[in-house]
Amino acid sequence: MSMPSFPNIDPPIQREDAVNQILSSIAMEELGLSHILNAEGEKLQYILGTIPGLSGPPATVSDVLSANESVRSMLETAAQNQLFLKSKMQGALTASPMQGPTGPTGPTGPTGPAGGPTGATGATGATGATGAAGAAGATGPAGPEGLSGIAGPTGPAGATGATGATGPTGPTGAAGATGPAGAAGPTGAAGAAGPTGAAGAAGATGPTGPTGPTGLSVTATSAFAANTSGSVLNVALLGTLVPLPNSQVLSPDITVNGANTVFTVNTSGRYQLSYTINTTLALASGTRLLISNTPNQASTLAPLLSLSHFSNEILVDLNAGDTISLQMFGISTPTTLLPGASGATLSITRLS
C-alpha cells in the first residue's frame, strides 16, 4: 500500500495543528453556508413583502414560484454540502498519525574482542533522509458540487452584433381609427366653361299686358326740301348756303326763310337730320350742316379726293328756335347741281 507523500513544510506542522486547520476550514464553510441560507430567507421575505422598512411592487405568482424553486434548489445543495462537511470532519478526527518510512540501516559497529562480553547495544542511529516521494496516488472520486459563488459584477456591454436578416413581413394590422377631418383646402381654379346647352323649349305666351298710354307722334314735326333746278353755286372758301326751293313739305312748327336756305324748328326735341348733294363734276369741295349758323362737325364731309356725290345723316338735340342750313365750302369755284330730284335734298324729322 502506497503512503501519501507531503511536501516539506518548514516549520513542520504537528498532527494536532493540521486537524485544527481542517476543522477551521469546515467552520468557515459552515458559516458561508449559513449566510447563503439567510440570503434565501430574505429573498422569500422580500417576495412576500415582510421585510421591515422595505416596500416594493407586489409580487406576481411567477415571482413567488421562481423564488420557491431557487430556495428548494439551494436547500438540496446545502444538504449535500452538509453531508460532505460531516464526512470531512469525521475523517479528520479519526485519521491515524502518519509515520514516515524507515530510514536506512546504520553502519555495523566494530567487532568486539573475542571472548569478551557482549557490548551494550549501540545507540540508535540518526534517522535517515526522507526517501523520494512515492508515485502519485490514483485520483479520488469527485467531491460534491460546491456552492454557487456570489454573482460577479456585470461585465461591459459587448459590441453590437451584425444586423440580422429582415424577417418576413407581418400580417397587415387592423385599420386605425379615422383621423379628424383636415382643414379645408384652398378654392380650386374655376373650371373651363362648359358647352352651351341646347335651347329650351319656348315658354307659353304670357297674358297680354294692359294698354299703355298714348305716346307722342314722332313724325308730327318734320320737313323735306330739295333743289331740282340744276342751280349753279359760286362756292366760297368759307362756305355757301345751298338753296332748297323745290318739293318742300313742312310741318306747321318748321319754317323756312325767303331764300329757302334757313329752316327754323319751333319745337324742342331730338331730331334726325340727313342730306344729299350731287354735282355735275367731281369737286374737291366739302359739305356740312350749320346748326344756328355753327358748323356741325359730325355732319361734315371734307374728302381728300374730288367727289361728285355727298351724303350724311346725324342725330342732334335741338331747342325751339334753332336753325338748320345746308352748306358747301372749300375751293372757290362755280358748282352746278345735278338737275332733277337728286340735285340736293334736306330731311328734318323730330324723334322725341
Image (cartoon, rainbow, N blue to C red):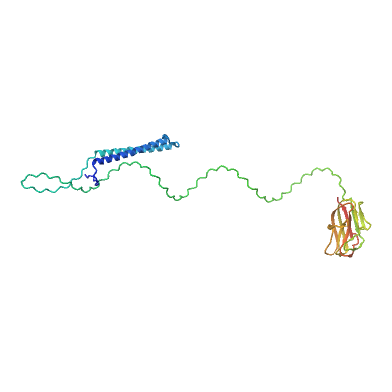
- Taking the image as shown, residue 11 lies to the left or right of residue 219, namely left
Q: Quadrant of residue 291?
A: bottom right
- Outermost residue on the left side: it is 115
- In terms of image quadrants, where is residue 313? bottom right
Q: Is residue 71 visible?
A: no
Residue at the front extreme, as displayed: 11
Q: How many marks?
A: 0
**Residue 277 in the image, given as x and y percentages of width and height:** 87, 60
Query: Height in image: 155 above or below 56?
Result: below
201 to the left or right of 118 = right
Left or right of 152: which side holds 24?
left
Q: Would residue 342 be found to the left or right of residue 114 on screen?
A: right
Query: Does 72 sit above or below residue 293?
Result: above
Percent of width and height locating residue 6? 24, 45
Quadrant containing the N terminus is: top left
User: Residue 241, how many percent across, how many down?
Assistant: 90, 60
Instruction: Check the image and name the residue furthest to the right.
Output: 258
Nearest the eye: 89 or 87: 89
Say which quarter of the image contains residue 335: bottom right
Q: From this viewpoint, is residue 276 visible?
A: yes
Q: In the rendering, at what x and y percent does residue 2 appear?
A: 22, 45
